[in-house]
Image (spheres, rainbow, N blue to C red):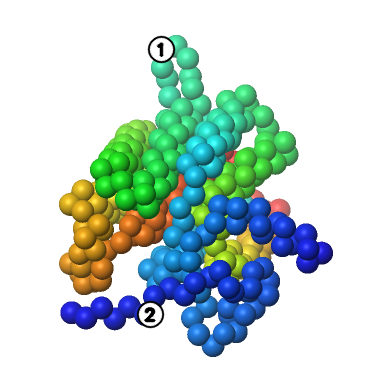
Amino acid sequence: MVESNNSHNDQFSATKIPADGHQAHPLKVYFVVWGWLFVLSACSYAIDFMGVQGYLRWTLILFFMFVKAGLIVAIFMHIIWERLSLTYAVLLPPIAVLVFVAIMAIESNYTVLTRFIFFDGG
Amino acid sequence: MTDTSPAKVTASENRPKGLTGLVEDWSSDQRAFKNVSWRKAMMWIFLLSDTFIFSIFLLSYMTARMSTKVGWPNASEVFSLHIGHTNFPLLLIAIMTFVLISSSGTMVLAVNYGYRKDRKLTAIMLLVTALLGATFVGMQAFEWTKLISEGVRPWGNPMGAPQFGGIFFMITGFHGTHVSIGVIFLLVMAVKVWRGDYDKQSKGYFTSRKGEYECVEIMGLYWHFVDLVWVFIFAFFYLW
């Protein structure tokens, strides 16, 4: 397990991080990611253009959103080349937001229920 | 003024990697971000706080939309454009998305040319990024004008749930403000790069610290974050 972890890290340190922490990487990586961002955005737009609805629509929206966000943070913002101490400090706290989302989703359901009961007389 | 920045960034080569490194960095009783300069660490911490601000905005949007009895306006129709005889849903928003992604690409090039000490190309790429950012804000102004002329107000609109306007103006307005501030800083930085401040390591006017090309990378972090927020706004507000 430890072995495979190391080889995973080495894959990224192939583009060696200088000791001063500067993020200088070959241009090719950026152009590939840039191209993908265009493709993924076009896909997002195609969902609406082709009028996909229902669960398929929401799944596709979320999928393209997370892939795009992941590419931007990982490559453009260099997070995969940073040390884990920074990566975790930045990526873990937003998980709290997901908890908040769950709480507010439950609360909204309750609110809309009471609105239907009291404004429309049930 | 004297340069009070902490000692040079320590070499990362001989520190353990992976989870062991994470634990060692954080428990070292010193600074936790070993190979990251104070400026970059501060930018990341600022961006983290900004993440929470935008998260709360989108969260309040979710709460409003989920708890209203009145139907939510169909973004696909509200933001459609008529060109000739065809109706393109979300066309302007799609173009804005592409403009912002293009600007992210030019920003990445600016960072890269900066580390290659290519002064001119860095400045040009920063200018192009600023120009694309300004284009984005311009298109947003057009979009606001269009919606306001159609009767959308923060307290109500002809298309459906009254919260739509308030949420729309708040979220896109806050994002547009971020883009505008970014454009200003990009222009300032382009001038600095063009003058060669980062080659000469001249001291900053406000900070009196030595300028370095790393500043371009940190500017890039901010700019990519603005692009990142747009990815979420595009998905949740316009497509959902």
Residue B167 in sight here: no
Report x, y in % for residue B218.
39, 59
Q: Amino acid at mark 1?
A: Gly
Instruction: Give the residue drawn at x 51%, y 26%.
Output: B89
B227 is higher (above) or lower (below) than B221: above
Structural distance between the alpha carbons of marks 1 and 2: 63 Å
Q: Amino acid at mark 2?
A: Ala
Q: Chain of mark 2?
A: B
Q: Within 10 angstroms of label 1, few (less than 14), some, or many (20 or more) residues?
A: few
Instruction: Give the residue drawn at x 57%, y 31%.
Output: A39
Instruction: Give the residue drawn at x 30%, y 61%.
Output: B212
Residue denoted by label 2: B7
The mark closer to the camera, 1 or 2, is 2
Judged from this view, the residue extending furthest toward the bottom is B29
Front residue of this view, candidates B193 and A74: B193
Report x, y in % for residue B24.
62, 80
Front residue of this view, candidates A117 and B226: B226
Q: Chain of mark 1?
A: B
- Left or right: where A45 falls relative to B124: right
Report x, y in % for residue B19.
68, 71
Mark 1 secondary-structure assignment: loop
Report x, y in % for residue B75.
51, 36
Front residue of this view, candidates B48 and B219: B219
B219 is higher (above) or lower (below) than B75: below
Residue denoted by label 1: B84
